[in-house]
Amino acid sequence: MFLLRRPSRREIERFLDRSRRLPLSYGPTGTVRHGSAADRVGEHVVTIGHGKPDFERARLALAAWKHFDLGWVEAYPAQLSVEAGTDVAVLIRHLGFWSLNGARVLYQVGGFEGQDAFGFAYGTLTNHAESGEELFEVSIDRQSGDVMYRIRVVSRPQSSLTWIGLPIVRRLQARFRHDSAVAMRRSSSAPTTLLSPSRRASARQGPPEP
């Protein structure tokens, strides 16, 4: 869904409500983990910290969707979880316009206690500009103690505008990978107070609409 202006909260809520009734735009699920030779798989791995405390902060940050708090990219609703079945609206500011893209959390990787990795994947819905699956994961190397952030994606353009603007889309994807890694490094490498879901919701509401 492409827009010439930033959508209001009500418009985002209506988009989410419609998204809950939509199917995934591809199949089968799990392609990002078990992609075949025919799939276009992209992967970006970066070190974001070191040691168990950084890993715990990274895990909490990922669960709180801090990797989407980029200013030009936002995930809604504010009270998001990473539980399977959660529907997500990804708001993106492009070059002079905006887009809303529907996705659904599919599964988690690892867990919150006693695991060396934690993450989740979501799949695109039929109202997303692209079609595919994306995995976000943080892990800690037991030997070196390095904390890694990984983005792994299998996708192809779905809308005609995405096909036409494919070079720009690829640049925006590269920018997202970079900015998302910066956000995760910032959240994990220094003690920070992560907003609770209720405070995140309040912070995003802003001034009342007319």
Image (tube, rainbow, N blue to C red):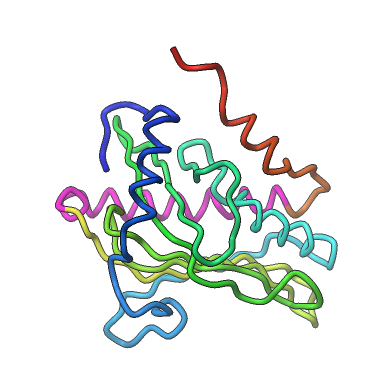
Quick one: quadrant of the N terminus? Answer: top left
The reply, left or right, for residue 157 in relation to residue 42 is left
Q: Where is residue 136 in the image (x, y as percent from the top left)?
A: 55, 65
Tell me which residue sits at (61%, 75%) in the image: 109
Is 99 placed above or below 138 here? above
- In the rendering, at what x and y percent does residue 56 appear? 79, 62
Residue 190: x %, y % from top left = 80, 48
User: Can residue 44 be seen in the rendering of this structure?
Assistant: no
**Camera-nearest residue between 111 and 136:** 111
Would residue 178 appear left or right of 133 to someone viewing this image? right
The one of 47 and 88 positioned closer to us in this rendering? 88
x 72%, y 41%: residue: 195
Quarter of the rendering containing residue 142: bottom right
Looking at the image, which residue is at 43% across and 47% down?
90
Looking at the image, residue 168 lies above or below residue 135: above
Magenta portion: prevailing SS class: helix
Identity of the residue drawn at 81% across and 77% down: 114
Q: In this view, does 49 lie to the left or right of 98?
A: right
Q: Quadrant of residue 117?
A: bottom right
Residue 164 among those drawn in magenta: yes
Residue 115 painted magenta = no
Residues in magenta? 160-187
Within the image, what quadrant is residue 26 found in? bottom left
Q: Say if residue 175 shows up in the picture.
A: yes
| Quadrant where the image shows the C terminus | top left
Numbered marks: total: 0
Q: Which of 3 and 173 is in front in this view?
A: 3
